Amino acid sequence: MRRRDFIKAIVGSAAAWPLAARAQQPMPVIGFLNGGSPDEFAPMVAAFRQGLREAGYVEGQNVAIEFRWAEGKNDRLPALAADLVARQVAVIAATSSPAALPAKAASTTIPIVFEGGFDPVEIGLVASLSRPGGNVTGVTNFSAVLAAKVLELADELLANPTVIAVLVNPTSLTRAESTAKDAQAAGRALGKQIHILNASTEGEIDAAFASLAQLRADALTIGGDPFFLSRRNRLVALAARHAVPVIWGGAGREFVSAGGLMSYGSSLIHSYRQTGIYTGQILKGAKPADLPVLQPTKFELVINLKTAKALGLKVPPTLQQLADEVIE
């Protein structure tokens, strides 16, 4: 080999070394922890991926995602969170209310980005909304504290109902307690009789609906728990079978789109997208302690007029005017 060709070969090889080294670096792995099921949460996962793309990360190209689904069995979440910690993921995205506390309990060092309907300060996830501190930050839609507004909407829609049932998932402890407490307080203020119904299995959901006639409930409200969200089609079918007006409190547009009557809350799609953006920022080096907890800037009222007609309800024009979306 000529001396000139030999030098060119050495220089070319040296220039390729950094590229080869970069190519061999493993992709960061995100642990995605959720209390629901993958099929029903597909639109939210798509929104999460969209947020990641906006932050510069594309699954399969420069980031990997390990999904862990509890399928509505919240007692599985601690073990699933521990599994992600053992996997040494770079970030845990705890994308449902029941998943946040198990994720925090599993690690004090891995960054955690939550999405949920709770007050994160009240339940001890963060020190404050503006300066979370520690290894946790995220997005809250505050759906667990909307019980009073949901009861007011039920009052206007149904022309002064006297008995209202509230369905909660007792395995989502922080959310169930907050929803029940706020509903009871709002019921007293409005002069309504409130019945709290518990359901954490499909059989208990059926039993809750069967009890409505005995309770003489004029309406049922449901919080945006992932267990219920994953079973929104079943809830819509039960509401139609029992001819009961059901109002979803929280991120519930998906419930109305499936045929439910009415919902009030922030956009779940928007919350998951923001969670994806925060996750990407942390992969780039941002620290959770420095990222303020994001809060909703808008709550949406969605009404399904077709469902209202099937129930024999006439939605007041004033309520229709307030709605952000009316499904004909």
Image (tube, helix red, strand yellow):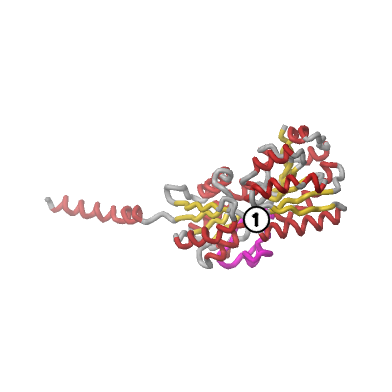
Q: Can residue 259 be seen in this view?
A: yes
Mark 1 falls on what kind of element? strand
Count numbered badges in the picture: 1
Q: Main secondary structure of the magenta part?
A: loop
Q: How crowded is mark 1: few (under 14 residues within 10 Å), some or many (20 or more)?
A: many
Left or right: residue 14 compared with residue 63? left
Image quadrant assignment for residue 41: top right
Image quadrant assignment for residue 254: top right
Rendering coords of residue 201 (x, y %): 64, 50
User: Which residues are the magenta region?
Assistant: 116-142
| In the foreground, 9 or 3 | 9
Left or right: residue 314 compared with residue 264? right
Rendering coords of residue 55 (x, y %): 51, 51
Rendering coords of residue 279 (x, y %): 53, 55
**Residue type marked 1:** Thr
Residue for badge 1: 140
Left or right: residue 82 compared with residue 311? left
Q: Decide: is 178 above or below 314.
A: below
Q: Does the magenta stretch include residue 117?
A: yes
| In the foreground, 135 or 66 | 66
Q: Does the magenta stretch include residue 155?
A: no
Q: Where the C terminus falls, by quadrant?
A: top right
Left or right: residue 251 compared with residue 156? left
Q: Decide: is 300 above or below 188.
A: above
Residue depicted at 47% across the width and 50% down the height: 57
Rendering coords of residue 61 (x, y %): 42, 48
Residue depicted at 52% across the width and 50% down the height: 52
Q: Decide: is 150 above or below 131.
A: above
Q: Can residue 264 be seen in this view?
A: no
